[in-house]
Amino acid sequence: MSGPGVPRRRPGSGGRVSDEQVWYLASRLTARDRWLLAMLAEHQILTTRQIALLCFSGDRTARARLALLAQLRAVDRVRPLRGDLATPFHYTLGPAGARVLAAQSALPVGQIYRRDRALSLIYSRLLDHTVGANGLFVALAHASRPRPATDGLVIWWSEQRAVAMWRQWVRPDGFGTWYHQGRRLDFFCEYDTGTEPLTRVAAKIPGYARLAVSSGMASPVLIWLPTQTRETNLRRQLGVTGGAVVITASPPPDTAPPEPGNPQDAADLAAARPVWLPLGSTARADLDGLTIRFGSPAAPPGSPDEDDEQGAPPPRPPQPRRPRP
């Protein structure tokens, strides 16, 4: 996978902000803005479209608000170049936003924000992978927005948080929890960009089998692949999984092609559709169907009996859906 080209940086986007700028920003932030800052701290980078799907009513409203947040240094944004094409804006947490978020969380700024790391990701070969994996969860969060707060996607951990939790066994690209009809499905995410041999993808499954044995729970691993051909070839390579529940998916034939210079949106919202195919099955399902089949009875999220922290390192991750107005 080739890395992005030299990005276009916003003029005057130095790292230092004054106390006055931070105070002014804090007075302008809405509950949605603060939630978005927490999401960027957790998930590193999101595109304009992803943010619009997560928490706005339309792209135009999202672009206007994000432009203001960039001006106030709450967020940083950049358009990586791919050849002669400029991708959509990619957003990271900004220096003023980080200071507000740190004060709100009673944490040192350095614990949640380092601008050099954000810039290194923009230049990294991992950019497509990170944005793509985030896009899969964005599709699930977007599909959950019309639902009650206790239904749909209620937990979304970043790769960094998931790896910190389970690195002894696996290094997932994300972890989520989906609720439906009083049942809970915890799942891992593996996002495949098609740039590594399928043997390496298949080699990740024994780690999930060992984790299932160690924990006594076989949380499914959802593997997203870029094409149906690659999905078919991977399924042929996956034999005995040792107790790991493996479910694959790829963009269906009617998925709209990605916009020029924006390969991360290739899957768009397809991940929320009935595209997931468990090994040994011939019927695809959406997350509701997977939860009915593989989930377990559970208390409503956020109830006293609900243990949703599972030893996660601080700060606690934000809910994957913004606070309702």
Image (tube, rainbow, N blue to C red):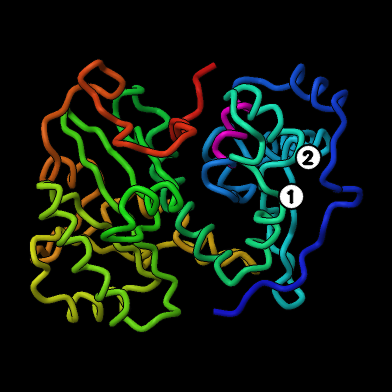
Q: CA distance from mark 2 to mark 1?
A: 7 Å
Is the residue under label 1 in contact with that under label 2 (CB below 8 Å)? yes
Magenta span contains residue 73: no
Can you identify the residue that label 1 sits on?
Answer: 77
Q: Residue at x 75, y 55 (%)?
A: 78
> Residue 32, located in which quarter of the rendered image?
top right
The secondary structure making up most of the magenta span is helix
> Residue 17, located in which quarter of the rendered image?
top right
Q: Which residues are magenta?
A: 32-40
Amino acid residing under circle 2: Ala
Q: How many marks?
A: 2
Magenta span contains residue 36: yes
Amino acid residing under circle 1: Arg
Measured as percent of width and height from the top left, residue 18 is found at 87, 31
From the viewer's perspective, tell me whether residue 105 is left or right of residue 271. Answer: right
How crowded pointer 1 is (Cα within 10 Å; few <14, some 14-19, many 20+) is rated as many
Can you identify the residue that label 2 sits on?
Answer: 70
Which quarter of the figure is the N terminus placed in?
bottom right
Which quarter of the figure is the C terminus placed in?
top right
Query: Residue 69, labelled with which disc?
Result: none
Q: For this rendering, which residue is in front, 222 or 266?
A: 222
From the viewer's perspective, tell me whether residue 76 is left or right of residue 251. Answer: right
Q: For this rendering, which residue is in front, 235 or 105?
A: 105
**Circle nearer the N terminus (2, 1):** 2
How crowded pointer 2 is (Cα within 10 Å; few <14, some 14-19, many 20+) is rated as many
Q: Residue at x 42, y 46 (%)?
A: 161
